[in-house]
Structure formats: C-alpha cells, structure tokens
C-alpha cells in the first residue's frame, strides 16, 4: 500500500527540540532560544554519506571517522511547546513557519529513498494515515517535494559555515572529540549541545550583536521557567549561562 499522510493540527509534534536551518534560526531569533546540537552518524548508517555533505567528518581517538551533524536548534525541553503554538494547537506563525515544520514528516537529513518509516505516527500523535488521507510517497520518492527540496538546499548551502564552526570548536574545545567518541560508542547515540555565542564568535557574523540582543531576554525567561525543576537542571544551567554570554556579546563595540 502506498503511504498516506495528512496533518490534523494536533500539535503533538510541536514540542521539544526543533532543528532549524541557519536561515530560519536567524529569522526567528526573537522567538526561539537557540543552540547548536551535535549528532554523530556512524560510518555504517544509511545516511552517512549525506551526513558528511550536510555536516562534517571527525576522526575520533580510536582512529575511526564519523560524520557529525551540527543543527541550529530551538532549544526546548521535550514537554515544552513551541513558543508559536497557540492554545487551540494551531501555529501562530503558520504563514512564516520554519522549513522544518513545512517539510514534516519528511526529513532532509535522510536520503529520500529512506523516508517511509517517518510516515508512521509516533505514539500519541494524531496524524491522519487513513485511506482518506492523500498519498504522499510512492516508489521511494516524495510526491509533493517543494518544501523538502527547499530545506535540503538550505542545509547544503549552510554546510560550509557549519564546517567552519566545527573546526573552531574542535580547535578551542578539543575535549569535545572525546564526547563525540562516547556518543559514537553508545547504542542510543546521544546529543551534544553548544552555545549560540560560540557559533557567532567562530563565524564572525556581522549581525552577531543584534542576534545576541534578541536572544538574551529569551534565555533569561527560559532560565526562570526551568529554575525550580530538578529534571531540567541541565536546561536551566545552559539558559542561565547563555543569557550572560548573550548580554556580553550584545554590548560589544
């Protein structure tokens, strides 16, 4: 049977970390608390070759090489709703929503031929996959592909910038290689989070002060929201530290 899929606007996918293109991260810097999320892709993974094009390659201490994706991300705890999600579960910025939201459930960090399982709703999601929903995937190809192609193109365009950032981080924070090695060895993988301030410093963006000024109050607000929840201690620590970094960066001459 050909996979069918339609969004029911249940809002269940609008929670937690949201990977963004760099363009979308900049465009929505006044809305999303931003971080860079690193994910290891092992050499035997189906998406390895694509990951080396969209991300970077890192040689680990055990001499193995892995691909590493570095995603600008709306950094939110898993149960936190997107700041743009309205009480009626509709998107408050639908006309201007990020590419990641437009392309869902397809994922351009995977090869197109390996998308079928993404059309199976996660537990609790209310996506329509009934016979009444439109066919969206046929013969390992996406039928309505404009959003997928646009997001993939943006990821390819930003790849050199992300590699520049990776080189900077691995030079000035060399211990991160060991963290990546642990992630590569763990059955479930894992994620490594670095700050937007390190990205702005490494890439020398001309709009760094403006982005930092937009982020500082968001980080402060998120630090307050997570202050008294032990389960969110890591999020709170990051938000509080990054708020100070953003304030300093915003005040630089």
Image: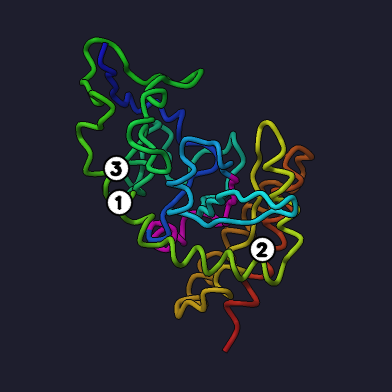
Q: Residue at x 51, y 64 (%)?
A: 163
Q: How crowded is the residue under tag 2: few (<14 C-alpha within 10 Å), some, or many (20+)?
A: many
The residue at the far right in this view is 230
Say the numbered circle drawn on residue 242.
2
- The quarter holding residue 156 reads bottom left
Q: Label 1 belongs to which residue?
A: 96
Q: In front here: 125 or 215?
A: 125
- For the residues marked 1 and 2, what is the alpha-carbon distance in whole angstroms? 26 Å
- Give coordinates of residue 107: x percent, y percent: 39, 38
Q: In front here: 41 or 242?
A: 41
Q: Secondary structure at mark 1?
A: helix
Extent of the magenta region: 24-40
Q: Secondary structure at mark 3?
A: helix
147 within the magenta span: no
The residue at the far front in this view is 63
Q: Label 3 belongs to which residue?
A: 148
């Amino acid at each position: 049977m050909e996979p069918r899929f339609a969004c029911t606007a249940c809002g269940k996918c609008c929670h937690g970390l949201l990977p963004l293109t760099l363009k979308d991260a900049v465009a929505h810097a006044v809305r999303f608390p931003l971080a860079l999320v690193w994910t290891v892709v092992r050499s035997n993974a189906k998406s390895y070759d694509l990951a080396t094009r969209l991300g970077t390659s890192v040689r680990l201490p055990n001499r193995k090489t892995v691909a590493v994706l570095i995603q600008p991300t709306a950094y939110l705890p898993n149960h936190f709703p997107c700041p743009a999600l309205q009480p009626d579960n509709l998107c408050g910025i639908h006309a201007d929503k990020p590419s990641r939201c437009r392309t869902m459930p397809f994922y351009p960090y995977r090869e197109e031929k390996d998308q079928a399982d993404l059309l199976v709703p996660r537990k609790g999601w209310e996506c329509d996959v009934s016979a009444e929903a439109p066919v969206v995937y046929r013969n390992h190809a996406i039928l309505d592909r404009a959003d997928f192609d646009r997001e993939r193109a943006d990821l390819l365009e930003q790849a050199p910038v992300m590699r520049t950032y990776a080189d900077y981080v691995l030079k000035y924070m060399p211990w991160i290689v060991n963290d990546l090695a642990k992630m590569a060895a763990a059955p479930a993988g894992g994620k490594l989070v670095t700050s937007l301030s390190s990205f702005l410093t490494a890439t020398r963006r001309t709009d760094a002060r403006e982005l930092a000024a937009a982020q500082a109050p968001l980080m402060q607000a998120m630090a307050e929201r997570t202050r008294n929840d032990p389960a969110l201690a890591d999020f709170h620590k990051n938000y509080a530290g990054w708020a100070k970094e953003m304030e300093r960066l915003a005040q630089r001459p």
